[in-house]
Image: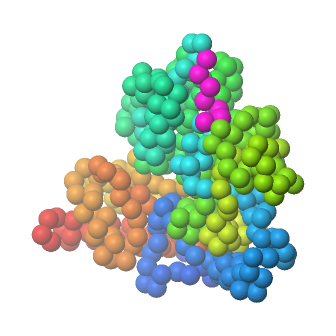
Amino acid sequence: MPTPAIEPTEACALALDRADPLAAFRDRFYLPPGIIYLDGNSLGLLSRDAEAALLQTLEDWKGRAIAGWFEGPRPWLGTAREIGALAAGMMGAAPDEVVHTATTTVNIHALMASFYRPEGRRVKILADALNFPTDIYALRGQLRLRGRDPGRDLALVPSVDGRTLDEERIAAMLTEEVALAWLPSVLYRSGQLLDMAFLTARAHERGVLVGFDCSHSAGIVPHELDRWGVDCAAWCSYKYLNGGPGASAFLYVNRRHFDREPLLAGWFGNRPETMFDMALDFEPAPDAGRWQISSPAVLGSSTLRGSLAMIEEAGIEAVRRKSLAMTAYLVALLDEHLAAPPYSFRVGTPREDSRRGGHVAVERDEGAERVCEALIARGVVPDFRPPNVIRLCPSPLYGTFHEIWRTAGHLQAIIDGGEYRPGS
């Protein structure tokens, strides 16, 4: 069935839902009753598939005890590599280039410790002024550990409009003083999707290594990390990958860097065949597993077996198509019904499909935070990013177009009724 054209009407929403090839996945999630959930870019919902995978792990623990590390269909000892391999395909990576371990920030530290090698004039790290704070904290810490001054050696690409970054401007700052660039794939406030292929090519032309934080793109945007030549990357698993609160993260290392020394080494990064020799000399694994610092969080990681299998079943390309249609429909509603006074909502996310991630940044100069609170009181769950951004994220595996239509209606009613005003 052909997909209906995007129009800012309720009839369009209903038609899009009828034609949705991913509609059946909604029934496999636990949906909060009476809630329109538009915060999957912060925490994805629990699926029955993830629950079943967790319960199976509990059964393994119950029945096998410590033998679970070595026995059964999925010995825990290989958890990090097994789940990393499950995520590799949607990221355009080989199975041995991805490992499921630690948290995003820990993985950034682990990667920077190996990839940031100041030498000669190349001493700077290039990042951006709109990056998520944890990335900047980690980069500054790594500079200080090398005796560098973050005020001098951390170069931040500025934003002209406070929302987006210009890839050409980023490229222009890849000078002979830059050793490493670390950038977001999708900007967490505005939802801008950067051109990772372009930036990687420009960095390599100028002798600069490049890595990406893919936390806001993994599971919603297809990646080609190998084909693009990205050097390294990290991403979390609790947003679009629906791994659960605090679930372990992922890191990627291009195989051409498998000979790099993991300076933040840990026992689980040792070559699996010799790790139980208990030698004090570290023998790093021959793949991305060498950057695994500590033992896998077996229970917390098990949910990803179910969640990643669902994304594979749906197909990351199909997920992306529905995500783009959902955000385009939301933008059309905002433009048609909510842009003019007294509503005065603006779209802060790029409108081009190639520049848009999985969420829409809805801006309002007056009372945006209170509008967000009023939405929550009405049973719509978005999130707020200061100073004036309401992030709305319709998730393709469990969201519907009619929910987006209803959300637009709630926004209109909140303004009409003055629910956003103090004391209302």
Counting from the top left corner in percent of width and height, residue 340 is at: 29, 53
Residue drawn 28% across and 70% down?
A: 374
Q: Nearer the viewer, residue 117 or 133?
A: 117
Image quadrant containing the N terminus: bottom right
Q: Residue at x 50, y 32 (%)?
A: 145
User: Is residue 117 on the magenta stretch?
Assistant: yes
Quarter of the image holding residue 66? bottom right
- Asked if residue 352 shows in the view, the reply is no
Q: Is residue 32 above or below residue 92?
A: below
x and y, in percent, of residue 158 in the image: 41, 29
Q: Quadrant of the C terminus?
A: bottom left
Residue bounds of the magenta highlight: 113-119
Residue 386 vs 409, above or below: the answer is above
Residue at position x 46%, y 67% in the image: 38
Q: Position of residue 274 (x, y in %)?
A: 85, 52
- Left or right side of 67 for 170: left
* 57 falls in the magenta region: no
Which residue extends farthest right? Answer: 273
